[in-house]
Amino acid sequence: MIRPVPVAVFASGSGTNLQSLLDHETPDGLYHVVVVVSDREGAGALGRAEAAGRLTRVIEVGGRPPEEVASEILALLDSLDVRAIFLAGYLRLVPSAVVSAYRRRILNIHPALLPAFGGKGMFGERVHEAVLASDAEESGATVHYVDEEYDTGAIVGQWPVRVLPGDDARALAARVLSVEHLLYPAVADHVCRAWAEGRVPDPFALSPVEPGSDMKRKAPWPK
């Protein structure tokens, strides 16, 4: 029997991707969220975590040396035997000491098809506005490993979403977010199974018959 991988989720905002991870979790599943960490008091993600009976912590980042922040994060994760970190709308750069300690054990989800439309300051509606301004025909969601820079880590899995005529940033964001909520738990299962079995995770590929998948152009685009 595979034991669930104990994970921490880091979030700065309302926590809808956190909720998708919590909703997907089962007692005999592949991961278990043991703590939710935010960089700010009052983040909606903290309320979601508390409602699910999970431990929460606020670790402030602004105005503090990265080394101090890293020390606080690592002490917390070590005390809870956390083996992986999932970023879910966490808007801070993860300190390099934390990245080093959890190399290829930190995942992030980004609302575009990286490497396009990523980097510092590219979050929320800014991403979708940039996609629309570029006249790109598709956007999507990307799950990737976290390294020392924003959105540059190796890609684990992607799910494309077509840009439709008449889209504005809000409409595109809503469709991409619906895909994020499906992709992130699926990738979480995929990598946690590999980690639990002592393997390096392979890239995640959507099934061509999975609803909404367009990876092989055999299924409908997400509506």
Image (cartoon, helix red, strand yellow):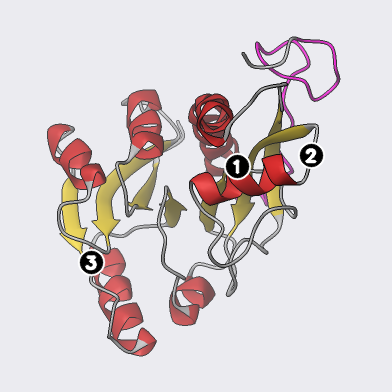
Kindly report the distance in space between the C-alpha atoms of the residues bearing marks 1 and 3: 38 Å
Q: Which part of the image, by quadrant, shows the C terminus?
A: top right
Rendered residue at 43%/56% (across/down): 85
Numbered badge on residue 128: 1
Q: Report whether residue 179 is seen.
A: yes
Q: Which mark is residue 51?
A: none
Closer to the chain start, of discs 3 and 2, is 3
Give the left or right position of residue 114, taking residue 82 as reference: right
- Say which mark, if any, is on residue 79: 3
Q: Which mark is residue 135?
A: 2
Residue at the image point whose x is 76% and y is 32% from the top: 138
Q: Residue at x 30, y 68 (%)?
A: 78
Give the dominant element type of the magenta stretch: helix, strand or loop.
loop
Looking at the rendered structure, the secondary structure element under dot 2 is: loop
Relative depth, front residue between 212 and 117: 117
At horizontal 34% and vertical 25% (from top left) the residue drawn is 23
Q: Nearer the viewer, residue 14 or 106?
A: 14
Check disc 1 and give the amino acid type.
His
Label 3: element kind: helix
Task: Identify the secondary structure beneath mark 1.
Answer: helix
Cα separation between marks 2 and 1: 11 Å
Q: Check disc 3 and give the amino acid type.
A: Ser
Left or right: 140, with 66 as reference point: right
Q: Residues within 10 Å of mark 2 (few under 14, many from 20)?
A: few
Q: Residues within 10 Å of mark 3 (few under 14, many from 20)?
A: few
Disc 1 and disc 3 in contact, CB within 8 angstroms? no
Q: Which residues are magenta?
A: 197-219
